[in-house]
Amino acid sequence: MNLSLPKAERHLTPLFAFMLLGSTFLFAGEHANAQQSAGVSISVKDHRFQPSRITAPANRPLSIRVKNLDSAPMEFESVSLRVEKVIASGGEGVVNVRALAPGRYEFFDDFHQEARGVLVVE
Ligand SMILES: [Cu+2]
C-alpha cells in the first residue's frame, strides 16, 4: 500500500525505519548498562561525612557503603533517595539505591542532623 501514500510520506518511511532501529540499539545499550550496579563509599567521623560530596553514574543501581567511625550510632537518611539505615558505632552498612536520573540527592545523619552531604549523579 506504499504506492498509495503521498510522495512526502513515502520519503519518510525509510527515515522512520532508521529511527526505530536507532532507538532499539539505544535501548539495548541502556539496558546492558542498567544491569551493572555502581558502588560508592563514604565515612562518618566526628559527625561529618567524609567526603561530603560523592558522585555516581546515572541510570545504574547504586550501592552506598557507609562506615561509621564515631562512637555513637548514626542513621544514614535521604528523603530524595527514600532510604534510611541505622549504622552502629564502628560499624558499616550498605544502602542499595535504584538506578537514578542525573541530579543532586542530599543525605544526612538523622541522629546528628548537622552531618549533611550530597550525592551528585551525572
Ligand atoms: Cu530517620
Image (cartoon, helix red, strand yellow):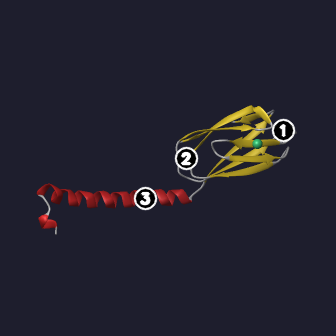
The amino acid type of the residue labelled 1 equals Asp
The amino acid type of the residue labelled 3 equals Phe
* Residue at x-position 76% and y-position 48%: 85
Write down the quadrant of residue 4 in the picture.
bottom left
* Residue at x-position 74% and y-position 43%: 76
Residue holding disc 2: 57
The amino acid type of the residue labelled 2 equals Pro
| Residue closest to the eye, 43 or 59 | 59
Q: Secondary structure at mark 1?
A: loop
Cβ of mark 2 under 8 A from ligand 1: no
Q: Are marks 1 and 2 in contact (CB under 8 Å)?
A: no
Q: Secondary structure at mark 3?
A: helix
* Residue at x-position 53% and y-position 57%: 34
Write down the quadrant of residue 115 in the picture.
top right
Residue 55 tag number: none
Q: Is residue 92 left or right of residue 32?
A: right
Spot occupied by residue 99 in the image (x, y as percentages of width and height) = 57, 52
Gap between marks 3 and 2 measured at Cα: 17 Å
Residue holding disc 1: 70
Q: Nearer the viewer, mark 3 or mark 1?
A: 3
* Residue at x-position 78% and y-position 43%: 75
* Residue occupying the far bottom of the picture: 1
Q: Is residue 17 left or right of residue 121?
A: left
**Quick check: can you spot residue 53?**
no
Specify which label sits upstream in the sequence, 3 or 1: 3
Spot occupied by residue 102 in the image (x, y as percentages of width and height) = 52, 43
Specify which label sits upstream in the sequence, 3 or 2: 3
Residue holding disc 3: 27
Q: Residues within 10 Å of mark 3 (few under 14, many from 20)?
A: few
Q: Residues within 10 Å of mark 1 (few under 14, many from 20)?
A: some
Specify which label sits upstream in the sequence, 1 or 2: 2
Gap between marks 3 and 1 measured at Cα: 44 Å
